[in-house]
C-alpha cells in the first residue's frame, strides 16, 4: 500500500493528511498541545486509531506508540554520525535513513523490508511517500514516520 503523507500548510499544531494512491484521504493526524509532541491518528470517519507521544526528559528523543489505549512499542533516536538510526521496540523492526534524512527503510528482524519512506522535495510542507509491503503494517509504519518527522521538527526548533 502506498501512502502520501502531507503536512497541512499554516497549522499551529502538527496536522497531517494521509492519502492513498488515488488521492483519497485514509488518515488524519492531529497534534495536541502537550509537553512534547502528541499526535493522534484518526480514520476518515473521525475514529481515533492510535497516537504517538513524545517522552520528555530523555537523553535522546523517544516516542511511544499506542493503538487505541494499548501501548505497542516505542522508537528512540540512536547516536550516529552520518546516517540517522532509530531503535524500535516493536516487532523487531529497525529503521535506517540516508545522510540527508530524506529516505528511510523499515526492516523486520529477518531483514525483510516492511516499508520504505521517501521525502518529496519541492513542496511547501513536509511530504513523504510511504510504501508499506503488508497492509496490516500500515498504521505502525505511519506512527514511525510521524515520530521521525516530529524528532526532525524538534531539532530544527
Image (cartoon, grey):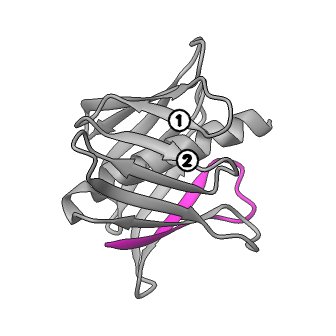
Badge 1 density bin: few <14, some 14–19, many ≥20, Cα 10 Å: many
Q: Is residue 93 left or right of residue 84?
A: left
Q: Is residue 42 above or below residue 96?
A: below
Residue located beneath label 2 in the image? 97
Q: Which residues are magenta?
A: 1-18
Dots 2, 1 in contact, CB < 8 A: yes
Residue located beneath label 1 in the image? 85
Q: Out of 99 and 119, give the one closest to the viewer.
A: 99
Q: Is residue 145 above or below residue 128?
A: above
Residue 152 is a magenta residue: no
Residue 148 shows in the view:
yes
Q: Is residue 42 left or right of residue 8?
A: left
Q: Position of residue 153 (x, y in %)?
A: 69, 42
Q: Quadrant of the C terminus?
A: top right
Say what secondary structure mark 1 lies in. Answer: strand
The answer to which quarter of the image holds residue 83 is: top right
Q: Residue furthest bottom?
A: 22
Say what secondary structure mark 2 lies in. Answer: strand
Residue appearing at x 37%, y 39% in the figure = 94
Amino acid at each position: 500500500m502506498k501512502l502520501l503523507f502531507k503536512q497541512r500548510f499554516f497549522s499551529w499544531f502538527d496536522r497531517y493528511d494521509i492519502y492513498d494512491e488515488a488521492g483519497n484521504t485514509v488518515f488524519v493526524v492531529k497534534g495536541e498541545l502537550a509537553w512534547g509532541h502528541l499526535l493522534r491518528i484518526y480514520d476518515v470517519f473521525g475514529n481515533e486509531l492510535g497516537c504517538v507521544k513524545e517522552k520528555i526528559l530523555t537523553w535522546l528523543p523517544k516516542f511511544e506508540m499506542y493503538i487505541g489505549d494499548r501501548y505497542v512499542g516505542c522508537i528512540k533516536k540512536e547516536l550516529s554520525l552520518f546516517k540517522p538510526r532509530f531503535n524500535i521496540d516493536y516487532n523487531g523492526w529497525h529503521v535506517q535513513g540516508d545522510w540527508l534524512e530524506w529516505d528511510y527503510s523499515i526492516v523486520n528482524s529477518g531483514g525483510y523490508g516492511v516499508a520504505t519512506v521517501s521525502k518529496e522535495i519541492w513542496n511547501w510542507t513536509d511530504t513523504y511517500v510511504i510504501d508499506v509491503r503488508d497492509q496490516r503494517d500500515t498504521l505502525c509504519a505511519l506512527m514511525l514516520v510521524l515520530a521521525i518527522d516530529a524528532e526532525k521538527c524538534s531539532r530544527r526548533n
